[in-house]
Amino acid sequence: KNEVEQSPQNLTAQEGEFITINCSYSVGISALHWLQQHPGGGIVSLFMLSSGKKKHGRLIATINIQEKHSSLHITASHPRDSAVYICAVSFYGQNFVFGPGTRLSVLP
Amino acid sequence: EPEVTQTPSHQVTQMGQEVILRCVPISNHLYFYWYRQILGQKVEFLVSFYNNEISEKSEIFDDQFSVERPDGSNFTLKIRSTKLEDSAMYFCASSETGGSRTGELFFGEGSRLTVL
Protein backbone atom coordinates (compact mmCIF):
# COMPACT_ATOMS: atom_id res chain seq x y z
CA LYS A 1 0.00 0.00 0.00
CA ASN A 2 1.31 3.48 -0.85
CA GLU A 3 1.98 5.31 2.39
CA VAL A 4 3.10 8.84 3.19
CA GLU A 5 4.52 9.69 6.57
CA GLN A 6 5.48 13.02 8.06
CA SER A 7 7.52 14.12 11.02
CA PRO A 8 7.21 15.72 13.39
CA GLN A 9 3.48 15.56 13.99
CA ASN A 10 3.56 18.80 15.94
CA LEU A 11 6.21 21.49 16.08
CA THR A 12 6.47 24.62 18.18
CA ALA A 13 9.16 27.15 17.37
CA GLN A 14 10.20 30.62 18.38
CA GLU A 15 10.00 33.38 15.82
CA GLY A 16 13.17 33.47 13.76
CA GLU A 17 14.02 29.80 14.10
CA PHE A 18 14.90 27.57 11.16
CA ILE A 19 12.28 24.86 10.73
CA THR A 20 12.43 21.50 8.99
CA ILE A 21 9.48 19.23 8.26
CA ASN A 22 10.08 15.79 6.82
CA CYS A 23 8.10 13.54 4.50
CA SER A 24 8.83 9.96 3.51
CA TYR A 25 6.98 7.68 1.17
CA SER A 26 6.96 4.00 0.39
CA VAL A 27 7.35 3.54 -3.37
CA GLY A 28 8.36 5.47 -6.48
CA ILE A 29 6.45 8.63 -7.22
CA SER A 30 5.82 10.94 -10.13
CA ALA A 31 5.59 14.12 -8.04
CA LEU A 32 5.47 15.39 -4.49
CA HIS A 33 3.55 18.42 -3.32
CA TRP A 34 3.92 20.49 -0.20
CA LEU A 35 0.68 22.11 0.87
CA GLN A 36 -0.18 24.60 3.59
CA GLN A 37 -3.50 24.35 5.38
CA HIS A 38 -4.55 27.53 7.14
CA PRO A 39 -6.26 27.51 10.54
CA GLY A 40 -9.54 28.24 8.74
CA GLY A 41 -9.14 25.06 6.67
CA GLY A 42 -8.16 26.41 3.25
CA ILE A 43 -5.33 24.63 1.42
CA VAL A 44 -2.64 26.34 -0.63
CA SER A 45 -0.06 24.62 -2.80
CA LEU A 46 3.48 25.65 -1.86
CA PHE A 47 5.65 23.46 -4.07
CA MET A 48 5.45 20.70 -6.59
CA LEU A 49 8.68 18.85 -7.19
CA SER A 50 9.89 15.63 -8.72
CA SER A 51 13.64 16.13 -8.20
CA GLY A 52 16.18 18.46 -6.65
CA LYS A 53 15.29 21.60 -4.79
CA LYS A 54 12.96 24.57 -5.08
CA LYS A 55 12.97 27.89 -3.24
CA HIS A 56 10.26 30.47 -2.82
CA GLY A 57 10.93 33.31 -0.46
CA ARG A 58 11.73 31.85 2.96
CA LEU A 59 10.57 28.38 1.96
CA ILE A 60 12.82 25.69 0.53
CA ALA A 61 11.73 22.21 -0.53
CA THR A 62 14.07 19.36 -1.34
CA ILE A 63 13.50 15.82 -2.50
CA ASN A 64 15.78 12.77 -2.56
CA ILE A 65 14.26 10.27 -4.97
CA GLN A 66 16.62 7.43 -4.04
CA GLU A 67 15.85 7.77 -0.33
CA LYS A 68 12.13 8.47 -0.94
CA HIS A 69 12.31 11.51 1.28
CA SER A 70 11.48 15.19 1.06
CA SER A 71 12.00 18.09 3.42
CA LEU A 72 10.34 21.48 3.73
CA HIS A 73 12.46 24.17 5.35
CA ILE A 74 11.31 27.54 6.62
CA THR A 75 13.99 30.11 7.31
CA ALA A 76 13.46 33.00 9.72
CA SER A 77 10.09 31.62 10.82
CA HIS A 78 7.28 34.02 11.64
CA PRO A 79 3.99 33.60 13.54
CA ARG A 80 2.12 33.89 10.24
CA ASP A 81 3.81 30.63 9.19
CA SER A 82 1.68 28.84 11.79
CA ALA A 83 -0.36 26.29 9.88
CA VAL A 84 -0.56 22.61 9.06
CA TYR A 85 1.94 21.55 6.40
CA ILE A 86 0.92 18.59 4.31
CA CYS A 87 3.00 16.40 2.03
CA ALA A 88 0.98 14.87 -0.83
CA VAL A 89 2.42 12.34 -3.22
CA SER A 90 1.35 11.30 -6.67
CA PHE A 91 2.22 7.67 -7.34
CA TYR A 92 2.63 6.92 -11.03
CA GLY A 93 -0.72 6.85 -12.76
CA GLN A 94 -2.59 7.20 -9.47
CA ASN A 95 -4.05 10.04 -7.59
CA PHE A 96 -2.66 11.81 -4.58
CA VAL A 97 -2.02 10.23 -1.23
CA PHE A 98 -1.79 12.76 1.56
CA GLY A 99 0.39 12.64 4.62
CA PRO A 100 -1.11 13.26 8.06
CA GLY A 101 0.26 16.80 8.22
CA THR A 102 2.62 18.63 10.57
CA ARG A 103 1.07 21.26 12.81
CA LEU A 104 3.47 24.19 13.16
CA SER A 105 3.09 26.91 15.75
CA VAL A 106 5.52 29.80 15.65
CA LEU A 107 5.51 31.87 18.81
CA PRO A 108 6.37 35.57 18.83
CA GLU B 1 -5.14 35.57 -9.73
CA PRO B 2 -7.44 32.75 -10.89
CA GLU B 3 -8.94 30.66 -8.14
CA VAL B 4 -11.16 27.69 -7.48
CA THR B 5 -14.43 28.67 -5.84
CA GLN B 6 -16.72 26.41 -3.83
CA THR B 7 -20.27 26.81 -2.60
CA PRO B 8 -21.69 26.56 -0.06
CA SER B 9 -18.98 27.27 2.48
CA HIS B 10 -21.01 25.46 5.12
CA GLN B 11 -24.07 23.26 4.83
CA VAL B 12 -26.04 21.63 7.61
CA THR B 13 -28.35 18.81 6.61
CA GLN B 14 -30.42 16.09 8.18
CA MET B 15 -29.33 12.48 7.90
CA GLY B 16 -30.82 10.88 4.80
CA GLN B 17 -31.02 14.08 2.80
CA GLU B 18 -29.23 14.70 -0.48
CA VAL B 19 -26.52 17.34 -0.72
CA ILE B 20 -24.93 18.97 -3.75
CA LEU B 21 -21.59 20.71 -3.35
CA ARG B 22 -20.54 23.01 -6.15
CA CYS B 23 -17.16 24.01 -7.50
CA VAL B 24 -15.99 26.33 -10.24
CA PRO B 25 -12.48 25.21 -11.28
CA ILE B 26 -9.93 27.49 -12.90
CA SER B 27 -11.09 28.07 -16.44
CA ASN B 28 -8.20 26.58 -18.43
CA HIS B 29 -7.76 23.56 -16.16
CA LEU B 30 -8.74 20.17 -17.48
CA TYR B 31 -8.49 17.92 -14.41
CA PHE B 32 -10.81 18.21 -11.46
CA TYR B 33 -10.77 16.52 -8.08
CA TRP B 34 -12.80 16.13 -4.95
CA TYR B 35 -11.13 15.45 -1.63
CA ARG B 36 -12.55 14.97 1.85
CA GLN B 37 -11.14 15.79 5.27
CA ILE B 38 -12.93 14.50 8.33
CA LEU B 39 -12.24 16.71 11.34
CA GLY B 40 -8.85 15.93 12.81
CA GLN B 41 -7.92 13.47 10.08
CA LYS B 42 -5.86 13.66 6.91
CA VAL B 43 -7.11 14.69 3.52
CA GLU B 44 -8.48 11.78 1.49
CA PHE B 45 -8.90 11.48 -2.26
CA LEU B 46 -12.44 10.86 -3.48
CA VAL B 47 -12.50 11.18 -7.25
CA SER B 48 -10.77 12.70 -10.25
CA PHE B 49 -12.55 13.83 -13.40
CA TYR B 50 -11.26 14.48 -16.90
CA ASN B 51 -12.89 14.89 -20.26
CA ASN B 52 -16.36 14.68 -18.76
CA GLU B 53 -15.84 11.37 -17.07
CA ILE B 54 -14.42 9.90 -13.91
CA SER B 55 -10.75 9.01 -14.41
CA GLU B 56 -10.16 7.52 -10.98
CA LYS B 57 -12.07 7.03 -7.76
CA SER B 58 -11.23 5.81 -4.29
CA GLU B 59 -13.00 3.09 -2.34
CA ILE B 60 -14.71 5.87 -0.39
CA PHE B 61 -16.48 7.00 -3.55
CA ASP B 62 -19.25 4.44 -3.63
CA ASP B 63 -22.74 4.56 -5.11
CA GLN B 64 -23.72 7.21 -2.58
CA PHE B 65 -21.55 9.72 -4.42
CA SER B 66 -21.66 11.10 -7.92
CA VAL B 67 -19.94 13.89 -9.81
CA GLU B 68 -21.08 15.89 -12.75
CA ARG B 69 -19.99 18.77 -14.92
CA PRO B 70 -23.42 20.12 -15.84
CA ASP B 71 -22.04 23.01 -17.88
CA GLY B 72 -18.71 24.42 -18.98
CA SER B 73 -17.82 25.88 -15.62
CA ASN B 74 -19.40 24.03 -12.70
CA PHE B 75 -18.22 20.74 -11.20
CA THR B 76 -20.53 19.19 -8.63
CA LEU B 77 -20.36 16.48 -6.00
CA LYS B 78 -23.69 14.92 -5.05
CA ILE B 79 -24.02 12.94 -1.86
CA ARG B 80 -27.21 10.92 -1.64
CA SER B 81 -28.83 9.79 1.59
CA THR B 82 -26.26 11.47 3.81
CA LYS B 83 -24.96 9.70 6.91
CA LEU B 84 -23.47 11.12 10.08
CA GLU B 85 -20.02 9.96 8.98
CA ASP B 86 -20.26 12.09 5.83
CA SER B 87 -19.69 15.15 8.02
CA ALA B 88 -16.40 16.57 6.77
CA MET B 89 -14.76 19.37 4.83
CA TYR B 90 -14.97 18.70 1.11
CA PHE B 91 -12.33 20.27 -1.09
CA CYS B 92 -12.49 20.75 -4.80
CA ALA B 93 -9.22 21.12 -6.70
CA SER B 94 -8.17 21.55 -10.29
CA SER B 95 -4.95 21.23 -12.26
CA GLU B 96 -3.83 21.99 -15.76
CA THR B 97 -2.33 18.53 -16.27
CA GLY B 98 -3.10 15.21 -14.68
CA GLY B 99 -2.60 11.47 -14.65
CA SER B 100 1.05 10.56 -14.24
CA ARG B 101 2.02 14.15 -14.98
CA THR B 102 -0.21 15.92 -12.51
CA GLY B 103 0.62 19.59 -12.26
CA GLU B 104 0.19 22.02 -9.43
CA LEU B 105 -3.07 21.60 -7.58
CA PHE B 106 -5.27 24.59 -6.90
CA PHE B 107 -7.72 24.08 -4.07
CA GLY B 108 -10.97 25.76 -3.26
CA GLU B 109 -11.65 27.02 0.27
CA GLY B 110 -13.71 23.94 1.03
CA SER B 111 -17.34 23.20 1.84
CA ARG B 112 -17.99 22.10 5.38
CA LEU B 113 -20.81 19.55 5.56
CA THR B 114 -22.47 18.83 8.87
CA VAL B 115 -24.94 15.94 8.95
CA LEU B 116 -27.27 15.88 11.96
Image (cartoon, coloured by chain):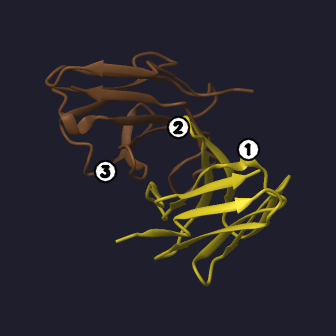
Q: Quadrant of the N terminus of chain B?
A: top right
From the viewer's perspective, is A61 left or right of B24?
A: right
Colour assignment, chain A = yellow
- Residue that mark 1 sits on: A80
Q: Which chain is brown in the picture?
A: B
Residue in the foreground of this view, choosing between A86 and A69: A86
Chain at tag 2: A
Dot 3: element: loop
Give the SS element for disc 1.
Answer: helix
Mark 2, other Cα within 10 Å: few <14 / some 14–19 / many ≥20: some
Residue beneath disc 3: B58
Q: Position of residue A108 (x, y in %)?
A: 77, 50
Q: Identify whether B26 is placed above or below A78.
A: above
At label 1, the amino acid type is Arg
Q: Are marks 3 and 1 in contact (CB under 8 Å)?
A: no
As drawn, which residue projects farthest toward the top?
Answer: B71
The chain under label 3 reads: B
